[in-house]
Amino acid sequence: MKPAASQPSPAPPFKRRAGQVAFIEDQMAHRIMALIARRQYGKTTIASDISVMKMMAIRGHDVVFGSVKLDLGREMIRKEGAQLQKAFAEQARRVRAAKMLLETTDDRGKTLAEIKDDDFAELYEASRLEFRLWHDRTTYSRTKVVALTPEAVGETGDLILDEVGRVRKFRDVWEAVKPFISSNPLLRILLTTTPPPDDTHYSFELLSPPVGFDPPPKPEGNLYKSDLGIWVRRITAYDAYANKVPLYDDDTGAAISPEESRRRDPDRDAWDRNYGCKFVFGGTGACSGLALDTAQQRGIGECSLITCYTSPRVGRGKALTVVDRDGDFDAGLRWLEKNIGNNQVGLGWDLATTTKQTSNPSAFAVCERYGMEMIVRAVFIWKTADPDVALDRARRIVETVRRRTNGGRARRLCVDATNEQYFAARVKRELLHELPVELIVASVTVEAPGQDGTITMKQLLGGRLVNDLDDNHLWLPPERYLRDDWRLVKKEKGAFVCEPDIDGKHGDTFDAAKLARHALFGSGGPAEAQAVQVGGWRNKTTQDQGGWKNQRPYGVGASKGGGVLG
């Protein structure tokens, strides 16, 4: 008699790692909770685990699982679909033990018994995939898988946002989804990711740890609160290794320590992000976050962003109502009149004459020259569909500069005439009696010293402003709006590009400042000598948060009795 054929032993039940257990406890304590973990730690698995826990605990409950992979290539979608299918298959054991039923359906509720891998992937790709957990014959809870985009995410329930560090337009997604939990205190938002490769990505700002956060490794990882108030459980390769979860050699497959893995990796920055879970500065952002911090720190109390419109939200899914505010503009002029110095002034105007929700605002920069440095004294932003109003405001700014006690008129006004050529020509015609007006067309090519061939005016002026920022030559208004606007500007293959933000920001304050810089320094940059009146302004030592000290001219902390620079 032949012995019975041996049957393959069943896979061992899913065992949670220490960091996964800790994250489950975290999300019970905090309504918005993030998990930053090393690659292949099991972020999707623990997300599916929490999803099933929610469905088992609450009858008729909805969980929305937002996946960035649905916004990526087809092969990536199929790989992630297989991973998600495996994760929920593991959860089915727990459901059966609780005498419930977990089944896969399409978005119309059709049960997909014995679903094939390709069919699962197709439903996943089409955002038509659901997991339904039946409490009895008539009541079920569900997890619905959707693409993680501002347009696709639109349902109320617990939200699990997977791999947010790779989500396109994540700032827009976050603004769209965050209000969903406001109607029910029991709802949660969970975010999982590794740090993004680009420091301009909103998850970098939202989830990065406080400066100096460097705790010793723990098996469960470490908990911190980001500067924007989000609680984060971070699990690095070092933490996982303390929990006996090793890394494996790319060639032999042998278990190795994190230290050895990092030593063998040719791209240390990528390793630090993916396994060390460090938020590494870099990427495509044209304006360094660190350089902006310094420039804005220097501008506290000395520079100002004057916003002359509001965009109150009147309800989700409805347009923003833009309210233009003359009172704020008038107050801004009074501030400028009081704070402008005696230095040479250049003006830059990035034109816009529409007021739709996502239309660009006009930005008008007033910049002062201080030796090799540029003080962006004031930036006015407004939205108006009336060219007469826009022109009147520009004229009043020009007049405010002209009326200062010392220093006289602005050196020049540079206006972006790329998209508003007829209106720009009118501006030049009507203001030419006040000061020279130069119209700049961004697409015009020029020859620049040190450059092979020609470059566009957009590249030339943008590059010079970024160089000033990197060389620590700028003073900037400290407002958050300006920082966010400048961080939208990216450098790709030598060109400056900018994708509009949800409220219309489009690097407009950056463009206004680069135009004002050109108005100050012309095409040659700040390389010419200037006469300076000796003893004309007194030194003032100030202690800033960064601990460094500056000597400041009038308008930058010194007395009005000072002389003229330049």
Image (cartoon, rainbow, N blue to C red):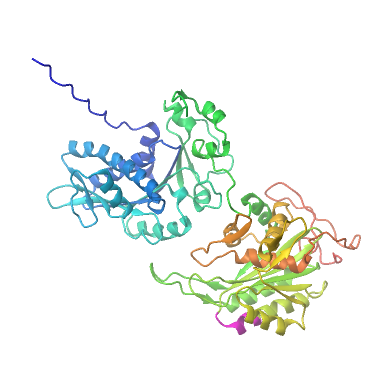
Q: For residue 454, which quarter of the picture?
A: bottom right
Magenta stretch: helix, strand or loop mostly = helix
The residue segment tinted magenta is 385-392
| 320 sits to left or right of 348 | left
Q: Position of residue 562 (x, y in %)?
A: 85, 65
Tell me which residue sits at (19%, 51%) in the image. Answer: 140
Q: Is residue 394 above or below residue 217?
A: below
Would residue 444 be visible to someone looking at this image? yes
| 512 sits to left or right of 226 | right
Residue 389 magenta-drawn? yes
Q: Is residue 78 above or below residue 39?
A: below
| 17 sits to left or right of 327 | left
Would residue 340 be visible to someone looking at this image? no
Q: For residue 409, which quarter of the picture?
A: bottom right
Residue 537 magenta-drawn? no
Tell me which residue sits at (31%, 31%) in the image. Answer: 15
Q: Is residue 112 above or below residue 375?
A: above
Furthest toward the left, the residue is 1
Q: Position of residue 363 (x, y in %)?
A: 62, 70
